Amino acid sequence: MRSCLIYLLMLIALPACAQIYKYTDAEGNTAYSNQPPEGTKAQTLELPPLNSVQPQAPVAPMVPAPRDRDNVQPYKTLQLTDIPNEEALRANNGTFTVGVLIDPRLRMEHRLRLLLDDQPYGQPSNVPRLQVVNLDRGDHSLAVQVLYNDKVVQQSPTVTFTLQRFHLPPAGKRP
């Protein structure tokens, strides 16, 4: 059994020990072989080591360290923009967009979500422009939250505003 194992190991190692021979054949052509030709002078060639590529370990996704995740104030600036503070916001169909001023830039693992009248509004997004759709006229409040998964990491100051919206009375009640 042991001699069989040694024989197997020799067979596996044999290609690694193979030599390449360079010689000139009877017609004057340069030839190469893994066996030296009989009756012809051959030169043993030293080949450079073969190129090889090692498999790369997969790159782990960037996940913040636990202390970063639990940090209450990861952004120096977080506030809503494009909301008038001295006058009513006019949106005849109740749809408008607000901007988010954030510094430094939003981290890859974070998302933004609006709070409308103290309730989560819309889907979290990584885009600093958020849309409110078909909001009724009247007084409202808005804030933006930074989320890590479903956990609130930071929240902007709340902005209150009045939405002005044009409503037509039903067709039978128009003047």
Image (cartoon, rainbow, N blue to C red):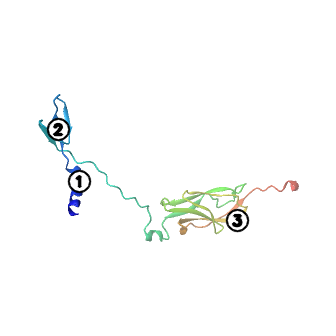
- Circle nearer the viewer, 3 or 2: 2
Q: CA distance from mark 1 to mark 3?
A: 85 Å
Q: Residue at x 21, y 59 (%)?
A: 6
| Nearest the eye: 138 or 151 | 151
SS state under label 1: helix
Q: Is residue 58 left or right of residue 40?
A: right
Q: Is residue 59 left or right of residue 75?
A: left
Q: Residue at x 61, y 67 (%)?
A: 158
Q: Residue at x 88, y 55 (%)?
A: 172
Report if the CB atoms under discs 3 and 2 are less than 8 Å apart: no
Q: Residue under circle 3?
A: 139
- Circle nearer the viewer, 1 or 2: 1
Q: Amino acid at mark 2?
A: Lys
Q: Quadrant of residue 55?
A: bottom left
Q: Residue at x 20, y 47 (%)?
A: 18
Q: Residue furthest top?
A: 27
Q: Residue under circle 2?
A: 22
Q: Quadrant of residue 123?
A: bottom right
- Circle nearer the viewer, 1 or 3: 1
Please tell me which of labels 1 and 2 falls first in the chain. 1
Residue 148 position within the rendered picture, expressed as x and y whole percent measured from the top left = 52, 66
| Nearest the eye: 112 or 169 | 112
SS state under label 2: strand
Q: Amino acid at mark 3?
A: Asp
Q: Is residue 104 left or right of residue 159?
A: left
SS state under label 3: strand
Report if the CB atoms under discs 1 and 3 are less than 8 Å apart: no
Residue 35 position within the rendered picture, expressed as x and y whole percent measured from the top left = 18, 42
